[in-house]
Amino acid sequence: MLDGKVVLVTGAGGGIGRDIALAMAREGAKVVVNDIGASVAGEGSDTGPAQAVVNEIKAAGGSAVANTDSVSEAASAARMVGTALEAFGRLDVVVNNAGILRDRIFHKMSPEEWDAVIRVHLYGSFHVSRAAATHFKEQESGCYIHMTSTSGLVGNLGQANYSAAKLGVAALSKSIALDMQKFNVRSNCISPFAWSRMIGSIPTETPEEQARVDRLKQMTPAKIAPLAVCLASDAASDVNGQIFAVRNNEIFLMSQPRPVRSVHRSEGWSPQTVASHALPALKASFYDLDRSADVFSWDPI
């Protein structure tokens, strides 16, 4: 499905990114495998993970190059795009997958923990997307696939930094889709459910948390790759600005915020009438304080 296309996958040294890179290559794409080789918390660096995936792709007869730049800086993101252009002469698809976690209950979260996660997930998605945007505009084609999360789309405990970043990524994707559709550039999101090194740090201090982790372990990163490959291909040329979720063998189309219910008063509102009329009228449509596990409460299929 991807013959002739060049794909850049960030954070592709392991987990979801690795399986996406391998699947892209199997479908004929030339792949830039980016991974800084950092820990789950974003510390350190190691050239090994990216090169190991490149070696796997080449051993299977594919074509790939490694890149170890960080997504969190504009200059290094530009070097990633430059790697694709130098190695393969073009770039067709960007998969913004790189991520870290610094989970902490909100009242204990430090500014450093907030900033680190926002920089990798939200700034990283912007920097890499922006670096590719000029090239996509000039060639009048391109495709972005961003990784969001139900931690942001629905909610989760102890992940204010990650949730905020991932909901921001969904909005970034929609804005790119709107701004660049006239250049035949598409942008979509995938919210993946998969057991990987990154979510291996999820707390398991209660029986409920342990049960959640046990369910997640059933969902391998390879389950995410088929949707990513399809979205990158011409078969999905009319798919733009959407948010999907993948959970084992299930694929979901996720909702996007739209008006649910309205009230009005011809004379306008006062704080008192908001309290006595608007809030009671709207209350039946209020959302519960759900977490992702509350919404996806059944065992993976």
Image (tube, grey):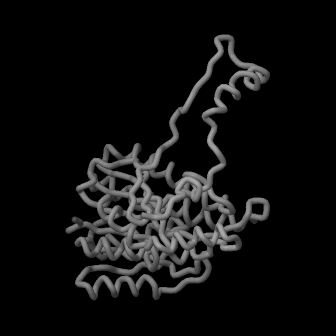
Q: Is residue 99 above or below residue 161?
A: below
Residue at 28%, 47% (x, y): give it: 238
* Residue 18, x across and y down, in percent: 41, 76
Q: Quadrant of residue 166?
A: bottom right
Q: Quadrant of residue 110?
A: bottom right
Residue at 22%, 65% (x, y): give it: 1
In this rendering, position of residue 159 left or right of residue 241: right
Q: Is residue 265 above or below residue 219?
A: above
Q: Nearer the viewer, residue 230 or 131?
A: 230
* Residue 53, x across and y down, in percent: 38, 83
* Residue 14, x across and y down, in percent: 46, 79
Q: Nearer the viewer, residue 291 or 266?
A: 291
* Residue 64, x across and y down, in percent: 31, 79
Residue at 39%, 53% (x, y): give it: 187
In this rendering, position of residue 259 left or right of residue 113: left
In this rendering, position of residue 191 left or right of residue 39: left
Q: Is residue 281 above or below residue 21?
A: above
Q: Quadrant of residue 181?
A: top left
Is residue 38 visible in the rendered image? The answer is: yes
